[in-house]
Image: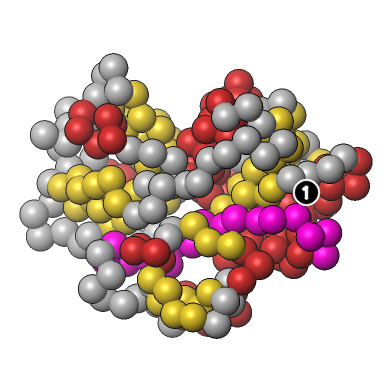
Amino acid sequence: MNKILEKEYFSEKVVKLVVEAPSIATSRKPGHFVIVRACERGERIPLTIADADTARGTITLVIQNVGVSTEKICALEPGECLADVVGPLGQATHIAKVGTVVCCGGGVGVAPLLPIIKAMKEAGNKVVTVLAARTKDLIILEDQVRPYSDEVIIMTDDGSYGTKGLVTAGVESVIAREKVDQVVTIGPAIMMKFVAQLTAKYEVPTMCSLNTIMVDGTGMCGACRITVDGKMRFVCIDGPEFDAHKVDFDEMMMRLRSYN
């Protein structure tokens, strides 16, 4: 069970694993995540499902090596098994035909964005995808998002690929030229905060995913408490996706810093 079939390095610290999980592959929807343990005494790690292949019975996970537990997961090789893969968990993304959708992802945030891009396109929307990272080497899944995007805009902080600038510049360039009906943003909290501020100015409905703050994934630990529209919510139970214009990002970033 949970055998790793494929492994690919996107960068030194970011790894893609294709994992055998037929029941999850069949029932998963965009926005869902799984809880993973590398070994029997390992820490529980929530990871968004980046893709699934029902014919092969596999799911795709993208892991950023940021600590002991993720390092253990990233060190596993094809043929080895994860101790646990539990899911799908969380609330699925609301997918509807709304018109033009801009999907913007920063860094590893592109992984959970990929199934949303696919679903939005399959629902009949025009999809413009904005991929952003510090440098060219940190842009991931570009080849995977292109078949489901009417246009792909690349933004890098240092100008090493695409256009030099922040993700907000790429999003605003689309809003300036045509009517945008919805924005989806997934990435670092600071990135989502500024995307939300931008789209609020133009009154464009915006959805964000707050998966980076999850720990336990069941609502028991309370680590993913956030404030949405003045009310307390749990990302793992009520989300991971919320109306970005109602999220208290400053509170979220303060709580994220407490884990460092």
Residue 203 is a magenta residue: yes
View extreme (top): residue: 55
Q: Quadrant of residue 153?
A: top right
Residue 19 seen:
no
Q: Residue at x 71, y 60 (%)?
A: 195
Q: Quadrant of residue 123?
A: top right
View extreme (right): residue: 177
Position of residue 32 measured from the top left corner of the image (x, y, whole percent) = 37, 47
Q: Residue at x 62, y 35 (%)?
A: 97
Residue 25 is a magenta residue: no
Q: Residue at x 41, y 47 (%)?
A: 92
Residue 245 seen:
yes
Position of residue 64 measured from the top left corner of the image (x, y, whole percent) = 42, 51
Q: How is the image coloured?
A: secondary structure
- In which quadrant will I find the C terminus? bottom left
Q: Residues within 10 Å of mark 1 (few under 14, many from 20)?
A: many
Q: Which residue is mark 1?
A: 171
Amino acid type indicated by mark 1 = Val
View extreme (left): residue: 40
From the viewer's side, name the closer residue of 83 and 99. Answer: 99
Q: Quadrant of residue 232?
A: bottom left
From the viewer's side, name the closer residue of 37 and 192. Answer: 192
- Residue 156, placed above or below residue 240: above
- Residue 157, placed above or below residue 237: above
Q: Which residues are magenta?
A: 201-217
